[in-house]
Amino acid sequence: MNSLIDTISQFINTYYLDPIRTDSGYNPVNTFTWAVILGICVFGVFKLLEKLEVKMTPRFIASVLPFVLAGSSLRVIEDSPAGLVHPPFSYLLITPNIYFLVFAITVGCLWISIRMQKAGLVKDFHFTFASFGLVWFFINLIILLHFQHVVAAYIPLFVIGAGTGLTFAFYLIARYFKSSIFTDPLNLSILLIHLMDASSTYIGVDKLGYFSKHVVPSYLIHLTGTALIMYPLKLIIFIGVIYLLDTQFEDDERSLNLKMLIKMVILILGLSTATRDTIRMTLGI
């Protein structure tokens, strides 16, 4: 019995706790586990938004994105060599724990914003909600810029420029073929964010000596010898996902809300890593 307990304890430490303690990244076991938990959380968030009577619209998605920027910059604060956060509090700022922390704060700000609208203090909760996230993001940036110096200002220019240029080229092709799915602004935003993520990975790995902590990208980069593989990988995956989302869901309001929620999650996953990596490289962390 003790042997079994020791084996289970070792398994949990090796695949779950040690990667958090050492910030060593992902492995196949915890990647699969976090993916399953994410899927469960998506449906939980869906139910929560229904209870809060929040409709999934592009405007709501836009109001959530400042919190993604805030969460990503908070993660960089933990990465900072200045040692701004110490254990055990620093463990809260490492994936996946930071997702739960940022989620809790985001939901709290959403609830406050909705209550302010119902009380007549604000006309539209979307603006108030987004403002909370933007203030948090700028506070994080001020902290980072106080303790760190900008060492590569060209990084965000490259990431944004490359992502935007490739997305615009894709848009022109989609418009030529008269594709309503791939000229939709929200769908193009998904591709833009993930091509920016691919750009941050490319310049970080191929040019600056960083490495990917994610299982599949790390394997493919090692296999091909270049992070340029991230561009076709992102396009293949998300063109397929977007097509399935826009063709396989029903047209009733509940199904449309769920589809929009999934798109928001996809945006968040891409923007969080793109933002974190870009800020880290810009500050030389």
Image (cartoon, rainbow, N blue to C red):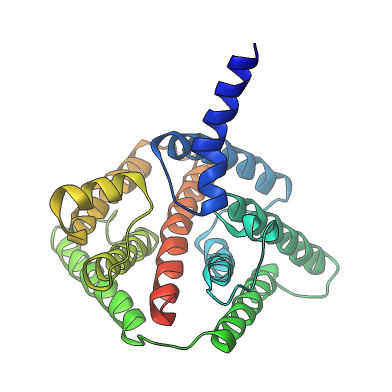
Regarding residue 254, the answer to whether it shows in the image is: no
Tell me: residue 50, above or below residue 195: above
Q: Outermost residue, front direction?
A: 3
Of 120 and 243, which appears nearest the observer? 243
Residue 81 screen position, x and y as percent: 53, 74
* Direction from residue 6 to residue 285 in the image, left or right: left
Q: How many callouts does the rendering have?
A: 0
For the C terminus, which image quadrant?
A: bottom left
Tell me: residue 70, above or below residue 216: below
Of 249 and 281, which appears nearest the observer? 281
Regarding residue 193, the answer to whether it shows in the image is: yes
Point 44% across, 69% down: residue: 275
Residue 24 screen position, x and y as percent: 45, 52
Residue 270 screen position, x and y as percent: 41, 59
Residue 206 screen position, x and y as percent: 21, 67
Point 55% across, 65% down: residue: 75
Of 153 and 12, which appears nearest the observer? 12
Of 211 and 259, which appears nearest the observer? 211
Point 53% across, 61% down: residue: 61
Point 54% across, 39% down: residue: 16
